[in-house]
Image (tube, rainbow, N blue to C red):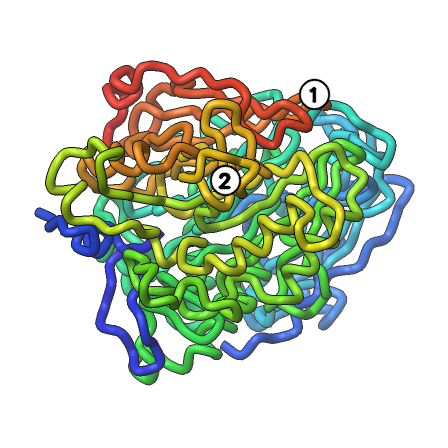
């Protein structure tokens, strides 16, 4: 989701969306060079953990130094036999190598030892540690603890994925958009209190790049300025990893993450960004490389091509129940965004060669889903896939000035509305119109817009005859997939008049739910016969604590490829809780 905008640099051609430009476009006013990052450390199974650490560092034989684990621990990208384990060691002497190990156990009391793995880390990787812990049992809970120079980390809990043949139900926590400057991460805290989660899917905007006071004023940033250099990006990640609520969630469940724009800078794409001024803020390729390097160092992510930090789209498998395809709709092969609102008469958004994900990633997604043996195909996608439409006329009872001012259009050039030809290509493939096999049970999970949206996926929502390539909003015929857009952890919702939201709903029969006020998280429950998305709202983000409330639930029956059941609680009860 766009934040504050600045004057475009010379390499940029079009502006993207902000809440202010969103409304103005509708006729309303408003009151580094990439390095080769490997998984650090080597694994070695021991019969049992040693009672004390080595008293010297292997690299220089000098006495051990004092270290701390200020940034706690994390795990991620579970496979059926392995998981990524992560920590960061803070040494008193940053010129020396730090050595240590991680011990893995079957129980939280750390009595049922499984294995140990040794590590070494230096300033070259910002003293982060990332290990692939393999040789584990499928669908099993493990506990782990790092130690170095006599210091021990907090104890982490993680879980491996089910193996092929396993089709048990799965539950995922789904989150996005955590602006530290806008408040406290109570959604992370509430999610960490749950006992029914297998893994966390984070859809991006894990960090934000702005300086203190530039976008949100509840908490101050480190560094206080906008982040540009490698040191800046590392410092911002370090600040986030010291947040107690985020630490709590990382310690409970493995994360599966993907970046959106704010992990680099606002409205970024392959060749630039809205919030980047070439020259004044360095060279874009270098800044992008700094952001990607820090992300690899500080996140428990398993790169699909070890050493290639520019490629993070990947497939995470959970037995025969779920194949999760995590896309990169930002930095890998995205063209500059279209203007907002999208004007269908200028043809930019519908140019056939215009790309959001690119040919390599398209083939990864479509071929992977066709090859999948899983019951459900989940797509981790950053920006809104379904259309946002306002269509004036006699069939649109939207109050003036909405119905008078707006031509038929997509409203968000930063989302898939600005890349409609490539979106149509994906829809055609899901239906089987590309000559390949149709793909069923596809659920798209989306973040970015700081609000909750639920929609059927169809290429022509306003053509009521599905046999003519349209969509029947009563039966859902013509829908090829479903999309759940999750609300943000803290980032502010869409500041648009209710009449605009209502106009979108009236002209967009494929949209089944909108909530632009709540902050919180979602729980996605995947069973063989249906997938259910629960929307949970927290009562405040202005201070730690508060309560939570279930605000809506939606079901997708297996084989239906559309929303089949919904339960939406009174909006007033939810908005009355919110401290935003």
Q: Crowdedness of circle 1 by 10 Å Cα count: few (<14), some, many (20+)? A: few
Q: Which residue sits at x=67%, y=43%?
A: 324
Marker disc for residue 529:
1
Residue 52 makes an appearance in the image: no
Instruction: Give the image location of residue 111, x and y in percent.
Output: 79, 28
Q: Which residue sits at x=24%, y=58%?
A: 4
> Regarding mark 1 in the picture, which secondary structure is present there?
loop
Mark 1 or mark 2, earlier in chain: 2
Q: Which residue sits at x=57%, y=37%?
A: 467
Q: Crowdedness of circle 2 by 10 Å Cα count: few (<14), some, many (20+)? A: some
Does 431 sit above or below residue 25?
A: above
Instruction: Give the image location of residue 143, x and y in percent.
Output: 71, 34
- Which quarter shows the C terminus? top left
Task: Say which of 315 and 205 sits in front.
Answer: 315
Side of 102 relative to 27 (left or right):
right
Instruction: Give the image location of residue 512, x and y in percent.
Output: 42, 28
Task: Say which of 31 and 180 sits in front.
Answer: 31
Quarter-wise, where is residue 564 in the image? top right
Instruction: Give the image location of residue 562, x and y in percent.
Output: 56, 30
Q: CA distance from mark 1 to mark 2?
A: 26 Å
Tell me the residue that label 2 is attached to: 470
Marker disc for residue 177:
none
> Regarding mark 2 in the picture, which secondary structure is present there?
loop
Q: Which residue sits at x=56%, y=67%?
A: 332
């Amino acid at each position: 989701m766009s934040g504050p905008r600045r004057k475009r640099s010379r390499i940029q051609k079009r502006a993207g969306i902000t809440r202010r430009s969103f409304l103005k476009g509708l006729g309303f006013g408003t009151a580094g060079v990439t390095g080769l990052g490997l998984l650090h450390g080597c694994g070695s199974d021991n019969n049992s953990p040693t009672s004390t650490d080595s008293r010297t560092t292997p690299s220089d034989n000098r006495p051990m130094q004092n270290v701390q684990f200020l940034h706690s621990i994390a795990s991620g990208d579970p496979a059926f036999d392995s998981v990524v384990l992560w920590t960061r060691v803070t040494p008193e002497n940053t010129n020396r190598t730090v050595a240590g190990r991680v011990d893995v156990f079957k129980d939280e009391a750390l009595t049922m030892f499984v294995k140990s793995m040794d590590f070494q880390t230096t300033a070259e990787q910002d003293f982060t540690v990332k290990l692939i812990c393999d040789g584990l049992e499928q669908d099993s809970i493990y506990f782990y603890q790092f130690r170095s120079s006599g210091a021990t980390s907090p104890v982490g809990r993680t879980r491996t994925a089910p193996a092929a043949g396993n089709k048990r139900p799965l539950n995922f926590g789904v989150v996005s958009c955590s602006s530290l400057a806008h408040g406290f991460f109570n959604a992370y805290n509430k999610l960490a209190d749950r006992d029914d989660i297998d893994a966390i899917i984070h859809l991006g905007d894990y960090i934000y790049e702005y300086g203190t006071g530039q976008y949100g004023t509840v908490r101050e940033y480190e560094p206080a300025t906008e982040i540009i250099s490698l040191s800046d990006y590392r410092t911002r990640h370090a600040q986030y990893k010291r947040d107690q609520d985020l630490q709590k969630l990382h310690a409970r469940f493995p994360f599966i993450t993907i970046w959106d724009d704010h992990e680099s800078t606002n409205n970024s794409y392959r060749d630039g960004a809205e919030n980047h001024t070439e020259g004044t803020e360095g060279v874009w390729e270098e800044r992008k490389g700094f952001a990607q390097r820090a992300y690899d160092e500080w996140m428990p992510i398993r790169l699909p091509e070890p050493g290639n930090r520019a490629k993070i789209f990947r497939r995470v498998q959970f037995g025969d129940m779920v194949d999760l395809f995590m896309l990169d709709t930002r930095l890998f092969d995205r063209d500059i965004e279209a203007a907002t609102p999208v004007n269908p008469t200028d043809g930019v958004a519908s140019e056939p060669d215009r790309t959001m994900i690119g040919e390599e990633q398209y083939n990864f997604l479509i071929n992977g889903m066709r090859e999948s043996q899983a019951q459900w195909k989940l797509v981790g996608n950053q920006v809104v896939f379904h259309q946002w439409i306002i269509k004036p006329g006699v069939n649109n009872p939207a109050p003036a000035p909405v119905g008078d001012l707006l031509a038929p259009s997509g409203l968000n050039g930063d989302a898939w509305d600005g890349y409609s030809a490539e979106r149509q290509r994906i829809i055609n493939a899901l239906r089987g119109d590309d000559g390949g096999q149709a793909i069923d049970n596809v659920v798209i999970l989306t973040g970015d817009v700081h609000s909750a949206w639920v929609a059927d996926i169809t290429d022509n929502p306003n053509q009521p005859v599905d046999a003519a390539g349209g969509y029947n909003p009563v039966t859902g015929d013509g829908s090829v997939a479903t999309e759940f857009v999750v609300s943000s952890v803290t980032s502010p919702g869409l500041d648009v008049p209710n009449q605009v939201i209502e106009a979108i709903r009236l002209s967009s029969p494929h949209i089944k739910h909108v909530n632009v006020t709540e902050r919180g998280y979602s729980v996605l429950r995947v069973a063989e016969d249906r997938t259910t998305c629960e929307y949970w709202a927290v009562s405040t983000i202005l201070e730690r604590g508060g309560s939570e409330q279930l605000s809506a639930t939606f079901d997708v029956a297996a084989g239906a490829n559309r929303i089949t059941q919904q339960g939406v609680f009174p909006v007033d009860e939810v908005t009355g809780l919110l401290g935003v």
